[in-house]
Amino acid sequence: MNIEMAYLLGMICGNGQIQRTSTNTTVSIDIPHKKLQTDEIHDVKLYVKASIADIRAIVEPLVGSGLDFIQNKSSTVLSFNKPNSDYLIREINRFIGNATSHHDINIHEDIFNCTLDERRQFIKGFADVTGYIRRSNVYFKKFEHRVYFEIPHNWQMVIDICNLLKSTDIPVQTIDWAHPNMRDGNLTAYNDGKPSFWKKEHQIKVWANEFTPIGFGIIHKQQALEMFSEELIAGYKALNKDADKKTHKYYWDSKRKSSKVKPPHPGEDDDFIPVTIRGKHFNSWSEIAKELGYVE
């Protein structure tokens, strides 16, 4: 393991696909353009070109020749093909097992035993393909900026990333679970004839200032993170409050307990939900997180 390998594995776990034949393996990483856009750079060609240059600088020394970037309308696909006997392919397979997609990849336990720098680089690679930060990502106050990570379908990956963040001392502010009790807690969509409204991606949200020790490998996203982090810190300072004391909290440290009881939702038994929590009712995101393994 080294920091380049950790970064690549993070990208694969975030949005990768693996195709295997008897002789070769092709690794493809889809980079959605909406994850690359910031409030300062709106021109697709500009931010995609800049992003590719940043990623290439990190990954190419590891992959070597044969690193391809194919730009589609809504995303750019990074890919490479190597013999199954290649050391890089053997290492990737060691860490992801027989998984073929980010939908069924879990973070290997050895990643949690890597150095702090390697764990941070893994999260950085993951963030570059799943995370974004924009002014619209605020909490209640206009300076309370957050980084969003979008994870479709893979419930275990949400927990794995939260625990990996915890291992680097970065708390999660909240998780917007793709669960009927969270996304349609008052049955508004259900009663409006949209029973599957809640089946979207999961969103992990982290305060901007908390994420700065890791940051983004894509430079213009990193610049946006630094700007929003400074705004958050200055915003709390203007209120005579210490930003670190406001944001560096894990849900189990909070004395506030959710008292709002949500009504039962027919979707609680849906096959989309993992067996371990299927059929159960939840009143808060932290109850789901605790049940699935994001704990103190």
Image (cartoon, grey):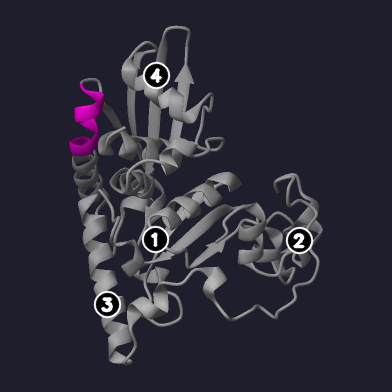
Where residue 125 appears, as percent x and y from the top left, is 34, 44
**Residue sitting at x 51%, y 47%:** 160
Kindly identify which numbered label has been placed on residue 193. Answer: 2
**Residue sitting at x 38%, y 79%:** 245
Residue located beneath label 4 in the image = 90
Q: Is residue 56 above or below residue 194?
A: above
251 sits left or right of 27 in the view: right
Find numbered disc 4 in the image and state the secondary structure of the residue it sits on: helix
Q: CA distance from mark 3 to mark 2?
A: 41 Å
Label whose residue precedes the other's in the sequence (2 or 1): 1
Q: Which part of the image, by quadrant, shows the N terminus? A: top left
The amino acid type of the residue labelled 3 equals: Glu
Q: CA distance from mark 1 to mark 3?
A: 22 Å
104 sits left or right of 282 in the view: left
Q: Residues within 10 Å of mark 3 (few under 14, many from 20)?
A: some
Q: Which residues are magenta?
A: 56-64
Q: Residues within 10 Å of mark 1 (few under 14, many from 20)?
A: some
The amino acid type of the residue labelled 2 equals: Gly
Residue located beneath label 1 in the image = 169
| Residue situated furthest top in the rendering | 23
Q: CA distance from mark 2 to mark 1?
A: 43 Å
Observer able to see residue 71? no
Q: Is residue 273 above or below residue 266?
A: above
Q: CA distance from mark 1 to mark 4?
A: 31 Å
The answer to whether marks 4 and 2 mark residues whose Cβ atoms lie closer than 8 Å is no
